[in-house]
Image (cartoon, coloured by chain):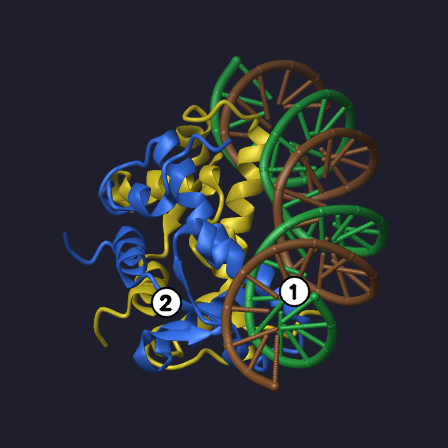
Chain colours: A yellow, B blue, C green, D brown
Amino acid sequence: MNLELTPVQTVACCSPLSREPLSATEAEGIAPLLKALADPVRLRLMSLVASHEGGEACVCDLNGAFDLSQPTISHHLKVLHAAGLLEREKRGVWVYYRARTDALANLATLIGGHSK
Amino acid sequence: MNLELTPVQTVACCSPLSREPLSATEAEGIAPLLKALADPVRLRLMSLVASHEGGEACVCDLNGAFDLSQPTISHHLKVLHAAGLLEREKRGVWVYYRARTDALANLATLIGGHSK
DNA sequence: CGTAAATATTTACACTCATCTATGTCTAAG
DNA sequence: CTTAGACATAGATGAGTGTAAATATTTACG
């Protein structure tokens, strides 16, 4: 039912914001990625995972950092995963999330346009 | 009525996502900036303004690029301005918007963390 | 002053979203 | 098989958001 390619692929295919105008389809591909990051809880989740030892963290590590219910954290992780910003891997009873640093780097290049 | 500091100032004061965990207050300061960008129309608006000749564009230049009513474009510009991503300057009958490239650069550094 | 043009504000509404509670699924251990 | 723990899903609710229509504000020019 979904005809879109993953946001991660989308963000890698266009020049920085200030170089040339974004097309409508490009913008519609990138916006979901930013929308996934545009939440305080998800920002902290990304930061926690990305800065965690080994570049990964299990949900049990993350739940404690927030004053939110476990399903809420699970929901936010799902959003970040759906956007392609987090990778999931189940090991035994635990689920580990790893940050997609390439996606973050591409996004940063698109926004800041520091080089290419 | 608003007791918060501008998001532009907020984003400049913390290390990249993958260096150390974001605090709750930091995340709440940065999220509005991303939320302002997390819309296809606003992304294109930022791109149009930033890539326009002279780094600025008047609303009359922007309205035509979209299939939306003028008040809607005005609304989106207001959101970007409130977030500190656009500067406003009225010259005669026209209003010119200029992209806050420093804010974009800071945001990119925070997300991508390419250096410091 | 009066009119026209450029842009902003207000109001209203449909839609999305963040969160909770309750429940389900999977894995490991007795 | 049963029980417990880790994580996900489902459904509900209240708050927020994108859009349009109508209206207001500002500026330029006769």
Q: Quadrant of residue A13?
A: bottom left
Comparing A20 with A26, the one in front is: A20
**Residue under the image location 56 percent in, 28 percent down:** A70
Which residue type carries mark 2?
Answer: Arg
| Residue A56 visible, this angle | no
Q: Is residue B65 above or below residue D27?
A: below
Comparing A27 with B93, the one in front is: B93
Which residue carries the number 2 mark? Answer: B98
Q: Is residue B99 above or below residue B17?
A: below
| Residue A111 visible, this angle | yes
Comparing B70 with A104, the one in front is: B70
Circle 2 SS class: strand
Which residue type carries mark 1?
Answer: Pro
**Residue under the image location 25 percent in, 55 percent down:** B109
Which badge, 2 or 1, comes first in the chain's sequence?
1
Q: Is residue A108 above or below residue A61?
A: below
Q: Chain of mark 1?
A: B
Instruction: State whether discs 2 and 1 lie on one chain.
Output: yes
Q: Is residue C1 above or below residue B62?
A: above
Instruction: Quote the CA–CA distance across marks 2 and 1.
Output: 19 Å
Horizontally, residue C23 falls left or right of residue C20, namely right
Which residue carries the number 1 mark? Answer: B71
- Report x, y in % for residue A28: 56, 70
Q: Chain of mark 2?
A: B
